[in-house]
Structures are given as C-alpha cells and as structure tokens.
Amino acid sequence: MSDDDFMQASDEEYDFEYEDEEEEDSGDVDIENKYYNAKQTKTSDPEDAVEEFLGIPALEPEKGEWGFKALKQAIKLEFKLQRYEKATEHYKELLTYVKAAVTRNYSEKSIDNMLNFIEKGADNPAAVQSIEQFYSLTLQCFQSTNNERLWLKTNIKLAKLLLDRKDYHAVGRKLRELHKVCKRQDGTDDPSKGTYSLEIYALEIQMYSETRNNNQLKALYQKALKVRSAVPHPKIQGVIRECGGKMHMSEENWNSAQIDFFESFRNYDEAGDLRRIQVLKYLLLVTMLMKSDINPFDSQETKPYKNDPRIAAMTELVDAYQRDDIYKYEEVLRKNTDLLADPFIAENIDEVTRNMRTKGVLKLIAPYTRMRLSWIADRLRISEPEAQDIVSYLIVDGRVQGRIDEHAGTVHIESKGDAERAKAIEAMTVAVGELYAAIFSDADGFRLVGDMSGAGLGDPMGDFGGSFGYPDRDRGRGGKGARGLRRPGMKAVGMGMP
C-alpha cells in the first residue's frame, strides 16, 4: 500500500470516530445550556425555573452530575416557595444520585449544604416538619450505604437543630445514641472518632449550660478539655470554652471565667464566626466583675476590635467603671438598653452596677460624718431603700464605721480619730481590770487594817509595815500572823476595802 493510500484510509477511520463524539458533546451542551438558562430565571421567575430544572434529569441517558445539580436547585426554590411536599419528594430522588452518579465527597458536601439551607429557611411549623423528613430520609440513605461518617455528621446536625428548638429530651436521646457509636466495645472513646466525640461533647455542654445543670456541666467540661485525639474546628473549641466561662461566672470564679472567655473569643475569631463579638462582650463584663484595671484591649487578639461599633457600649461601660464615674456608667446603660437583650449580660450586669454604686457611695460619704439617706439616693439617682441597703452592706463589711438611724433616715459616720480613742480607752479599761484582778485576787494586796492608835506614828510604815516585811508587822494585830480587826468608828486603811 502506498503512503497516499495509507493516509486516505486513516482519514476515513478518524472521520467516523469524530462524528460520534460531536453528537455526544452536543447532548451535554444542550443540558448544560438548559441548566444555566434556568439558573438565570431563578430570581425573576422562580416557578418557571423550577420546571426547567426538573426537566433536566430526564434529558440524561443515565443519572449524572447535571441532573444532580438541577434537582438541588429545584429543591431550594420549592422550599422558598413553601412547596414542602414537592421539595421532600424531589429530595428523596436526589438521594438516589449519591450512590453512583456523583463522587462521595461532592455528594457529602452538597447534602450538608442542602441541610444548612433548609434549616435557615425554617420559619414556620410546616417547614420544621419538612426539615425532620429531610433528616429522616438522609439518615436512612447513609445508613443503607454504610456511610458512617456522613451518618454521624447528619445526626450531629439534627442534634443541633433539636437544641435550637429547646427540645432537651430529644437532644439527650440523640446524644446518647451518638456517644454509643463513638465508643469502643470496652466503653472507652474511639480515638479514630475523636473529632466527632468533641462535637458531641460541645452539644452536651451547651445543653447543660442552658439547663443550668452545673454538676454535669463541670464534669463534662473537664472531660472535653482532656480529649487529645481530635483535630476539632475552632468553632467547636469556642463553644466549649464559652460554656466553661459561663459556668465559672455562675460560681463567681472570675479569673477562670476570664481565661475561658478569652480562649473562646480567640477560637471564634479564628473560625470567622460572628459569635466572637458576643463573647468579647462577656470578656469585658468579667473584666469589670474582677475589678481589674487591666485594659482588655491590650492583647494582640482583641486590639483590632477596640473601636468596633458593635461593642462600643460595653467599651464605654468598662472605661466608666475603671474611672469610677458612676454618672457616665448610668448614662451608658440608660442609652443602650439593647445591651440587656442578652440574658447572660442582663443576669450579671446587676452585680457590676451594684459594685459601681458601692464605690460611688464610698466616695460620696468620705468627707462627712452625718447625712441623710435621701441625699445619698438623690446624688446617685437611686431609690432610698437601695441607698440604705448599700450603706448597710458597707457597715457590715467593715468598710464604713458608723450606724444608720432608720427612724430619722440618717447615717452617722465615726471618724478615725474617734475610733482610735475608743480603742485606746477600751484597752486601758482592760488593763485596769487585769491589774485589779492581779492585786486583789492573786496577792495579799492592801488587805491589812490596823489600829491607828496602836501604830507608832514615828514609824513611817506603821501597821503597813507588816505587809512589806517590817519589824512592826505584829504590833496591834493580836499576835504573830493574826490579821487585825476593824474597830468600831475606825476607817478602813488601804484600797478596795469594803
């Protein structure tokens, strides 16, 4: 065969093959065009877009990626249009693509995103019921395909949903089921599932934190901190540390609370989670409760947020607190009522306010020794009973020496000089009492009473000599060693005689 004949034969063979590929590519291009055309009409005509998307799976000779993508878009639009039954029906069809039509990683990511989407859009009872059906179908699918990893992830997401709905009994059952899967046969934690175990601990810690079960919370918190086999997402660590900080706050362990809130903020910040702003407010709150003069924005992690408008009110509160400016503090609270929208801040800010007012009372009464309770209340802009309560606390605590005349509504403060004189007089009284006891109880003292006529006036000691060992001690005493008797008409000689 000549070279020309060979080339001609080769061209004929390759021409035949190219015609088949062009026909196949043409089909894919049509499906792709239909998909993107439907995507462009999602905003303007969502109902028409749903019909276009639902028509794409039928165009594929066998289940493939374009049909999977089209069903995803159709389900999201149906959920927005509140066609929950249709969305559930098509979601069930979507799960049939997971086994072979798309890759495992792509299907897992897509299903996870789908569940996140419907959770955010669940704003009515029908939507919530639809979500439960979505989770049920997902769990059945991945249990039948032995995809334990996605089964665990889906169950953890379901537990989060139940926790958001405050269904604590259902959360408890789900968490016990998850714990069982993440343990070995001997009951110890499976190191290969450490990341999932830590997520489960985080959910359980949240539940105990919300239900104020501090005994269980403390034990579980310590257990979660000891997990070393996991490489958790920073957000999980942020959740655990935040709940730990709240636990320490309830025990008034301010130092430990500050450490946990700072670690929580740092982890949330690393994860890019908006929760970091709220936790930073908690950090500023505990700084005031610690009565610390350290600026919380001195650290490298918090410094970029110093002028953030979302925490401006808390920053002003801390500044007023550290400067003991009660009027500025009260003004910030009055203007920023949204601060108390957070139950945790509302619960603990009262303690800060009380500390602030206590410091205000101490500064106010320092120059005076007598004042009215109504005057204190007016100056601090509080009620008179509250002013009395604060002054009473200061007196009991020993920080103020004084008393309250409730009938007259006045406060009487003792000066330091008066207190020192009173202490000196009290000490002197005790010393005199001890001296008296030593002389008249433990020794003979001046118990001798002699007859002045019998005493030698030339003897300077006279009858007293007997008491000090002088020779005249027996004279007029009725014999050696005998004590003299008091005669009628004679006065007692010596101290302390009746």
Image: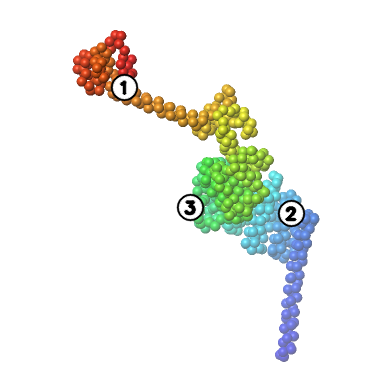
Locate residue 469: give its quadrant: top left
Q: Are marks 1 and 3 in contact (CB under 8 Å)?
A: no
Quadrant of the snapshot with the C terminus: top left
Q: Residue furthest bottom?
A: 2
Precedes in sequence: disc 1 or disc 2: 2
Total number of numbered discs in the rendering: 3
| Label disc, if present, on residue 440 of the rendered structure | 1
Image x and y of residue 288, in percent: 57, 43
**Residue found 49% across the figure and 31% down from its top:** 417
Which one is in front in this view, the residue at disc 1 or the one at disc 2? Answer: 1
Identify the residue at the far left of this view.
Answer: 480
Residue 77: mark in rendering: 2
Q: Amino acid at mark 3?
A: Thr
Q: Which element is circle 3 on?
A: loop
Q: Measured along the vertical axis of the image, is residue 346 above or below residue 308?
A: above
What residue do we see at 73% from left, 81% from top? 13
Q: Residue at x 67, y 60 (%)?
A: 97
User: Split into 4 quadrants, where in the image is the N terminus?
Assistant: bottom right
How far is the residue under mark 1 from the one under mark 2?
105 Å
User: What's under tag 1, amino acid-wise?
Assistant: Phe
Residue beneath disc 3: 188
Is the Cβ of the residue at disc 1 closer than 8 Å to that at disc 2? Answer: no
Tag 2: residue type? Leu
Secondary structure beneath label 1: helix
CA–CA distance in space, label 1 to label 3: 79 Å
- Residue sitting nearer the eye, 360 or 307: 360
